[in-house]
Image (tube, grey):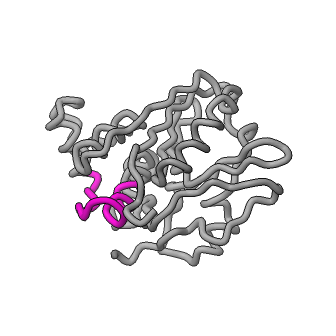
Amino acid sequence: MSNLLVNIHESLVSKQTGKSYLIKGNYEYYHYLCDGFDDRGWGCGYRTLQTICSWMKLNHMDVAVPSIREIQSILVDLEDKPKTFIGSRQWIGSFEVCLVIDKLFDVPCKIIHINKGDDLKTIVDALVKHFIEYSSPVMMGGDVDCSSKGIMGIHIGDHGASLLVVDPHYVGKQPRKNYLQDHGWVKWQPLHDFLSSSFYNLCLPQVKAKNA
């Protein structure tokens, strides 16, 4: 374990009555500057990937969480990116996250593409099935809404579905979990609060925690 906070979503309960479906197993919270590397403004996809990799390390296969530069090198080695990608500030999305997870942990990922935020309700069943059958975190990215997010669960409530979002954009020293929860760095976000004009891609690693 590093000195990063673990399982920052714990104790955060949806305000709606209903049923929640959550990941199983531990993960570490990676965010801007958490390792001293300044990736503000472009590194959110890498940080969400690192959070998912930490879950893989702790629950599936003991492989070190890669640095941002190591992630870039993997994508170049896979011929997904040119050599100039290493050391750049180019962002990555759900497809690149799938490639790295498959390479490091030998875990296939399912990609779900949503043309616009208004259609997110069409993936509710798929996400419920994912958290029941598997137990891994999900990566979510988009175009207009280009802010990467980790999805740690889904809640089916009286007024619709909400996603449990872990936001990698926090900058600063590791605070307490309740600070992150109180300030919205981890939150239950209703589907209607996502941008209707943005497409979204979700990366669903097809693996269970060993003890799930």
Question: Residue drawn 55% across and 49% down?
Answer: 131
The magenta stretch spans residue 62? yes
Question: Residue drawn 66% across and 67% down?
Answer: 181
Left of 136 or right of it: where is 163?
Answer: right
Q: Nearer the viewer, residue 22 or 169?
A: 22
The answer to which quarter of the image holds residue 129 is: top right
From the viewer's perspective, is residue 3 above or below residue 46?
A: below
Left of 162 or right of it: where is 25?
Answer: left
The x and y percentages for residue 150 are 51, 51
The x and y percentages for residue 210 are 37, 62
From the viewer's perspective, is residue 174 above or below residue 211?
A: below
The x and y percentages for residue 101 are 30, 46
From the viewer's perspective, is residue 144 above or below residue 168?
A: above
Q: Quadrant of the N terminus?
A: bottom left
- Please give the range of residues in magenta: 52-68
The answer to which quarter of the image holds residue 124 is: top right
